[in-house]
Image (tube, rainbow, N blue to C red):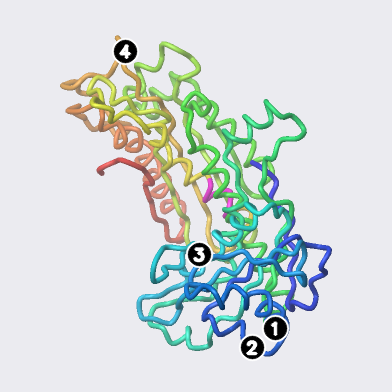
């Protein structure tokens, strides 16, 4: 994973030094906010006034205007049309559904600053109207984290692009769009902002692991390479333990349905299946309220097997591992946050559903970990095969914990793409 941009927090615009940033991205609701007679709005309105006079659509979408009073002379105005309607919620801070188009309020504003050449933007979040708390079912308590995650998404460069740039440009390669972010939120304490940054950066760490693994080239992310990527990420996460099972005999014994689904991939060791286990334990065991068991589908490429995908439908099947990628990212984010209320046990089943002489065949009958006979109808239904035995293992562990006297509630979730189960 890449190193995140440096994030500095400010509870007042007056704390922001001009030399610390090379653009200001102002995110606000309601066009009239710029007309308020107080800093920084007076300077911003002065910069925007000539454009407002000649463009009646000004203020309805992201716009870059020259502003000598801000760092870099770049002022990006990124409005949100409304957060008070009965259909609005915190996603509008991220995806602002405007009258004429769809604008990612923070993400698009930061992306526009990047396009203009900025690498150290200040993101100014104008206060939300007090009336948002009256909107039914609209929880804005995490709106600062949502905004920061949007900015970090604009900064992210995909793994494939990072590696290509590094290979071709060396030390000059841009592997992160931003060097730093100055986050300015009025009327919030420094402690509140630091807490928001800690939570958002933890989530972003997990999200980037999932994105790096999930993107693109299936040869770049074979089962073994997925395991290596997770291991590298987990090594720096407190309380998160990593284990990988590669031995085919052990997989055949403990995860027989995965073994049979992956048989055609045995022809090349680089495409062999593996099972990754992640265990997270709360730093405060007395506060644990739930033990979550997460099973992730990690099919690094899905040809359909003998039930071959045809007519171009195989394109994009490198993304059939996104369930496992998401679980790995969730575990990393949980560990980085040092969450106290939950324990995690994750089982990620990675395979390439290949086609070949040793392929699993329709009409075969195979036995699951639980001893249940399974009639194969369609080898392109591999998702339920690779997850069934890990689910059985989780059930065994929960029952064993009950016998041992544990009363902590437990739940099992399967996480998968393209799977009916």
Q: Position of residue 350 (x, y in %)?
A: 44, 31
Q: Which residue is mark 2?
A: 36
Q: Earlier in the sequence, mark 2 or mark 1?
A: 2
Label 1: which secondary element? helix
Q: Nearer the viewer, mark 4 or mark 1?
A: 1
Q: Position of residue 17 (x, y in %)?
A: 82, 69
Asked whether the residues under the numbered discs 2 and 1 touch, taking CB atoms below 8 Å apart as contact, a structural biologist would say yes
Q: Nearer the viewer, mark 4 or mark 3?
A: 3
Alpha carbon separation for disc pair 2 and 1: 7 Å
Q: Nearer the viewer, mark 2 or mark 4?
A: 2
Q: Which residue is mark 3?
A: 94
Question: Compared to 200, does 271 lie above or below?
Answer: above
Q: Which residue is mark 4?
A: 356
Which quadrant holds residue 260? top left
Q: Which residue is mark 1?
A: 42
Label 4: which secondary element? loop
Near mark 3 (Cα within 10 A), the count class, few <14, some 14-19 or many ≥20, is many
Label 2: which secondary element? loop
Which quadrant holds residue 249? top left
Which residue does the image show at 25% across and 23% down from the upper left? 308
The boundaries of the magenta stretch are 329-334
Asked whether the residues under the numbered discs 2 and 4 touch, taking CB atoms below 8 Å apart as contact, a structural biologist would say no
Asked whether the residues under the numbered discs 2 and 3 touch, taking CB atoms below 8 Å apart as contact, a structural biologist would say no
Alpha carbon separation for disc pair 2 and 3: 24 Å
Question: Compared to 127, does 385 lie above or below?
Answer: above
> Is 21 included in the stretch rendered in magenta?
no
Near mark 1 (Cα within 10 A), the count class, few <14, some 14-19 or many ≥20, is some
Q: Quadrant of the N terminus?
A: top right
Q: Earlier in the sequence, mark 4 or mark 3?
A: 3
Q: Earlier in the sequence, mark 1 or mark 3?
A: 1
């Amino acid at each position: 994973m890449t190193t995140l941009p440096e994030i500095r927090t400010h509870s007042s615009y007056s704390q922001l030094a001009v030399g610390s940033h090379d653009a200001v991205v102002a995110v606000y609701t309601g066009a009239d906010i710029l007309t308020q007679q107080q800093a920084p709005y007076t300077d911003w309105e002065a910069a925007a006034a000539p454009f407002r006079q000649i463009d009646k659509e000004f203020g309805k979408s992201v716009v870059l205007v020259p502003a000598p009073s801000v760092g870099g002379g770049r002022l990006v105005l990124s409005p949100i049309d409304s957060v008070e309607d009965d259909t609005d919620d915190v996603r509008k801070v991220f995806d602002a559904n405007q009258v004429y188009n769809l604008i990612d309020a923070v993400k698009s504003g930061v992306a526009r600053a990047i396009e203009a050449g900025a690498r150290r933007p200040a993101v100014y979040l104008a206060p939300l109207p007090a009336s948002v708390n009256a909107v039914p079912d609209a929880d804005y308590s995490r709106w600062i984290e949502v905004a920061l995650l949007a900015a970090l998404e604009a900064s992210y460069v995909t793994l494939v692009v990072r590696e290509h740039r590094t290979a071709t440009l060396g030390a000059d390669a841009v592997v992160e769009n931003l060097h730093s972010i100055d986050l300015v939120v009025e009327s919030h304490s420094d402690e509140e902002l630091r807490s928001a940054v800690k939570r958002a950066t933890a989530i972003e760490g997990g999200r980037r692991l999932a994105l790096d693994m999930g993107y693109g080239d299936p040869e770049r992310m074979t089962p073994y390479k997925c395991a290596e990527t997770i291991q590298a990420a987990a090594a720096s996460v407190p309380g998160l333990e990593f284990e990988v099972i590669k031995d085919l005999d052990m997989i055949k014994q403990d995860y027989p349905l995965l073994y049979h689904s992956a048989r055609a991939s045995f022809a090349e060791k680089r495409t062999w299946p593996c099972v990754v286990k992640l265990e997270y334990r709360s730093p405060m065991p007395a506060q644990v309220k739930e033990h979550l068991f997460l099973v992730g589908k990690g099919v690094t490429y899905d040809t359909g097997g003998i039930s071959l995908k045809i007519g171009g439908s195989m394109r994009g099947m490198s993304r059939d591992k996104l369930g496992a990628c998401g679980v790995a990212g969730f575990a990393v984010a949980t560990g980085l946050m040092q969450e106290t209320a939950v324990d995690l046990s994750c089982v990620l089943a990675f395979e390439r559903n290949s086609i070949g002489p040793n392929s699993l065949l329709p009409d075969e009958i195979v036995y699951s970990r639980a001893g249940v006979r399974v009639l194969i109808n369609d080898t392109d239904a591999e998702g339920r095969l690779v997850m069934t035995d890990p689910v059985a293992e989780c059930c065994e562990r929960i029952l064993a914990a009950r016998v041992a006297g544990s009363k902590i509630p437990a739940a099992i979730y399967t996480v998968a793409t393209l799977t009916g189960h």
